[in-house]
Amino acid sequence: MLRHVTDEEIEQRVKVLRAELGLQNQSRPDLITAIEKLTARFRHFSYQQIPDAEMPGAEAQWDARKGVLRIRESVIAAMQRGGPRARMTIANEIGHFAMRHAGVRSRSTTQATTGKRLLEARKEESEARRFAAMFLAPNYLLSATDTVEEIADRFGLSVEAAMIRKGEFDAFQRRASGQRRELPSIVVDYLKDAQRRGVKLRTDLD
């Protein structure tokens, strides 16, 4: 059975890697610099710029067997411009490296996989995605008062990614404080109506 890796475990790996790269307090690190630092620090890590035509199936790809991060030239260019999608793409592949995923991994890996390997690929892609979001916008640099727009601007995320990241951070804080997420009012009303009709509920609505 595949073991679930918690957000807390991933956060710890983010902290360790950011510290090793000297990025602890940088809210918007240059990812080209981060890749170069990874190359200098880890013997089994290097990267290559690949012409787009030679890598049609993925924007970037981590090959654990060869220790190579392959990146489309257009993604490198977009990353140098600070493009949010390119930054997330590269952080995602760094996530595969940091989470020690085997084989060849990219954000499109699951499309060509079936059976048990598909489940494993989906699990690892989820881990890499969560790592990427935390690597770009670490919990320890976020605040409960941050708005989606502030997160997007400060950490170089798209608005959509910032919305997801804020939701993840809010959930992380609730878990840390032992709080449960409040149900939407429409759900509470529905459950109370069901309770009045004699349905036994396992949820405390008071």
Image (spheres, rainbow, N blue to C red):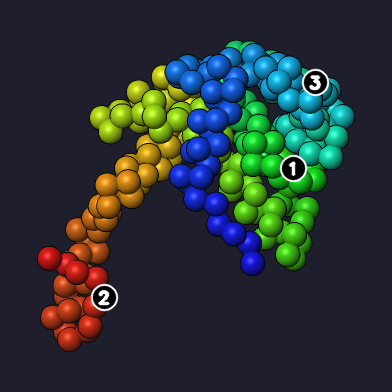
N-terminal of the pair, mark 3 or mark 1, is: 3
Q: Which residue is mark 3?
A: 49
Rendered location of residue 135, percent (x, y): 53, 30
Taking the spot 84% from the left edge, 40% from the top edge, the residue there is: 65
Residue corresponding to mark 1? 105
Residue 49 relative to residue 88: left or right: right
Report whether residue 178 is seen: yes
Residue 169 location (% of width, % of height): 37, 39
- Write down the residue under mark 2: 202
Residue type, label 1: Arg
Quarter of the figure with residue 128: top right
Instruction: Provide the secondary structure element on which disc 2 rests.
Output: loop
Nearer the observer, 75 or 102: 102
Task: Tell me if residue 192 comes above or below residue 110 in the rendering.
Answer: below
Q: Position of residue 94 (x, y in %)?
A: 65, 32
For the point 69% across and 42% down, which residue is it? 100
In contact (CB < 8 Å): disc 3 and disc 2:
no
Q: Which amino acid type corresponds to the residue marked 2 in the rendered image?
A: Arg
Residue occupying the point 59% across, 59% down: 3
Q: Quadrant of the N terminus?
A: bottom right
Q: Quadrant of residue 92?
A: top right
- Spatial CA distance of label 3 from label 2 is 55 Å
